[in-house]
Amino acid sequence: MSAIRSKHTLPERALRKALRQAKVKYKLHYSREKIDIAIPSKRLAIFIDGCFWHGCPKHGHKPKTNKGYWLPKLRKNKMRDKAKTARLRAVGWKVVRFWEHDVQKRLVWCVNKIAKLAR
C-alpha cells in the first residue's frame, strides 16, 4: 500500500490546475485536518475522496479478498471523514467533498461550485 498516494493524486492535480486557470487562490494540505484544498480566507475546505477508499455509493466496490482487513478499514475511513467534516464545521468552516469520479467527469461543475463558494 506504500504506492497509494494520499497527496497530489490525479484528481487533486486536475482540480488544482482548473482552479488556477479560474484564478481561484488556495492552499494545499492545510491545517491539522489535512484539508486537500483550502481557501482559508473564506474558511472553505475541499476534499477529493477516492471512490474505493471512501466508499462511493456509485463506484466504490467491496474487496473480494481479505475482507476481515478491508471492510473495517474502509468503514473507519468513512467514520474519519464524517468526524473531520464535523470538526471543521464546528469551528466555522464550509466543507465540500467531491468524489473522484465527479472531478474526472464533471470538472467544470466542481470548479464552478468552488468559485461560487469562494466569492
Image (cartoon, helix red, strand yellow):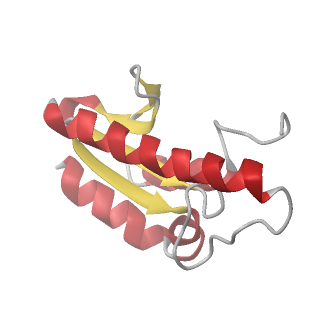
Instruction: Tell me if 13 is positioned left or right of 33 in this view.
Output: right
Viewer-side residue, 17 vs 96: 96
Number of residue marks: 0
Instruction: Give x and y (percent) for residue 37.
Output: 43, 39
Instruction: Give x and y (percent) for residue 41.
Output: 20, 30
Viewer-side residue, 111 vs 68: 68
Q: Decide if residue 49 is in sight here.
A: yes
Quarter of the image with the N terminus in it: top right
Instruction: Tell me if 20 is positioned left or right of 53 in this view.
Output: left
Q: Which residue is painted at 15% across and 34% down in the image?
A: 90
Q: Which residue is painted at 16% across and 49% down in the image?
A: 119
Instruction: Tell me if 22 is positioned left or right of 78 in this view.
Output: left
Q: Which residue is painted at 53% across and 65% down in the image?
A: 103
Instruction: Tell me if 101 is positioned left or right of 31 in this view.
Output: right
Q: Which residue is painted at 46% across and 46% down in the image?
A: 20
Which residue is situated farthest in the bottom direction here?
Answer: 58
Instruction: Give x and y (percent) for residue 108.
Output: 44, 70
Image quadrant where residue 35 sits: top left
Q: Is residue 109 above or below residue 53?
A: below
Q: Is residue 30 above or below residue 100?
A: above
Viewer-side residue, 100 vs 78: 78
Instruction: Give x and y (percent) for residue 30.
Output: 42, 25
Which residue is situated farthest in the top direction here?
Answer: 32
Q: Decide if residue 25 is in sight here.
A: no
